[in-house]
Image: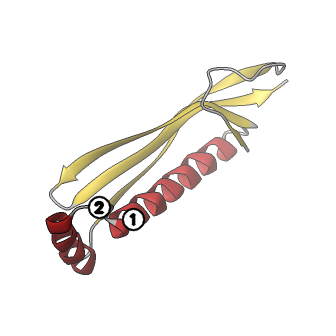
Amino acid sequence: MMLVTIDSIPGKEYEVLGIVKGTIVQSKNVGRDLMASLKTLVGGEIAGYTEMLNEARQIATKRMVDEATALGADAVVGMMYGSSAVMQGAAEIVAYGTAVKFK
């Protein structure tokens, strides 16, 4: 499955199948939350959260690809990520784009 963030794929003709997305709501665990609280005192990267968000993006991307595959897509164009805080301690990550089939 080809994933591109640009709006079109140069040199390819395709038909648009529709919007596809993958989403996950990920929460912090107590250990990560405690370490993050301590890290905010001294500053710097909060590696536990970086790792959690990277994992969440991977899961959201896989879910989006699975949805595109079910439509018979060859690629997803205009692929983007979005995120939001759902509640304290939980973030939603969304991967989305337009599924296309090559001609």
- Mark 1 residue crowding within 10 angstroms, few (<14) / some (14–19) / many (20+): some
Q: Name the element at disc 1.
A: helix
Q: Quadrant of residue 79?
A: top right
Which residue does the image show at 49% across and 52% down from the upper left?
A: 60
Would you place residue 62 above or below residue 18 in this image? below
Q: Quadrant of residue 35?
A: bottom left
Question: According to the image, label 1 marks what residue?
Answer: 52
Which residue does the image show at 58% across and 54% down from the upper left?
A: 62
Indicate the amino acid at tag 1: Met
Would you place residue 16 above or below residue 25 in this image? above
Indicate the amino acid at tag 2: Gly
28 vs 75, nearest the viewer: 28
Mark 2–mark 1 CB contact (< 8 Å): no
Q: Quadrant of residue 13?
A: top right
Q: Name the quadrant of the C terminus.
A: top right
Question: According to the image, label 2 marks what residue?
Answer: 44
- Mark 2 residue crowding within 10 angstroms, few (<14) / some (14–19) / many (20+): few
Question: Is label 2 or label 1 in front?
Answer: 2
Pinpoint residue 76: horizontal percent, then vertical percent.
65, 35
Q: Name the element at disc 2.
A: loop
Pinpoint residue 93: horizontal percent, then vertical percent.
38, 49
Q: Name the quadrant of the N terminus.
A: top right
Which residue does the image show at 42% across and 44% down from the upper left?
A: 94
85 vs 103, nearest the viewer: 85
94 vs 43, nearest the viewer: 43
Label whose residue precedes the other's in the sequence (2 or 1): 2
* Gap in angstroms between the C-alphas marked 2 and 1: 16 Å
